Image (cartoon, rainbow, N blue to C red):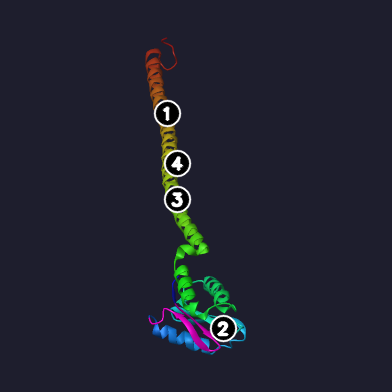
Amino acid sequence: MPVKYACMTRSGKLVAEHPPAEQPKLAATLQKLLSGQNPREYRREIVQDNDVSYHILCTGSGDVIGCVTTSNVPSRVVFRMLDEIEPIVSSSSADIRNARKVLQQKIDFYNDPQNDKITSIIGTVAKAQDQMTIVIDQALERGKHLEGMSGKSQALADQAKKMEERSTELKRQFWWKNMRVLGAIGLVLLAIVIVIVLSACNPNFSAC
């Protein structure tokens, strides 16, 4: 996550913060936001400011707890942290001197992404989705390759069929050409035979 800074006020007075001096600008802004809240009204509020978010929880009993996080942190996670802090520091038996320690423990806990079960599950699902995407892309690539091979095979088959049809047509054409040649030769031979017969037997066949 990370939580950059958290603090708590009681009846408008700052009673705990963590870390105390690392984020002075963020701390000043959050403390100003908390001082403008009605500590006797129960409410939740989020204030966005560029790349950070200010989350505020008014408990309604005089305590106001707030924290600053990066803007990408889910609000449900932040308010879950504040909800866990509130009963510890706001109970009648709570020692306000331990509030800073509680803030530190919760910040350390929630800054560890492995402790956010939903975030951890989402991360696992995201990894699984990435892996599945890779597998699907590979399968699609193989499918495209197979489709390409199938297309080429079909094209070759179509080409072979056309060549076979063309060959059959050429054979038919040559057969008719041969038949015409043979017919012409037969007519020539028949004419020669007729001429020979007429020459030998006279036109009226009187010499035969």
Mark 2 and 3 residues: CB-CB less than 8 Å, in contact? no
Q: CA distance from mark 1 to mark 2?
A: 109 Å
> In x, y percent, where is residue 79?
55, 74
Residue at disc 1, secondary structure:
helix
Q: CA distance from mark 4 to mark 2?
A: 78 Å
Nearest-to-viewer mark from 1 and 4: 4
Q: CA distance from mark 1 to mark 3?
A: 59 Å
Nearest-to-viewer mark from 4 and 2: 2
Q: Which mark is residue 154?
A: 4
Q: Which residue is mark 1?
A: 175
Q: Which residue is mark 3?
A: 135
Residue beneath the point at 42% across and 17% down: 203
Q: Is residue 100 above or below residue 153?
A: below
| N-term mark: 1 or 3 | 3
Nearest-to-viewer mark from 1 and 3: 3
Check the picture and name the quadrant holding the C terminus. Answer: top left
Q: Find the magenta span and give its range.
A: 5-21
Amino acid type for the residue under numbered disc 2: Asp
Quadrant of res 1: bottom left
Amino acid type for the residue under numbered disc 4: Gln
Q: Which residue is mark 2?
A: 63
Q: Is residue 139 above or below residue 48?
A: above
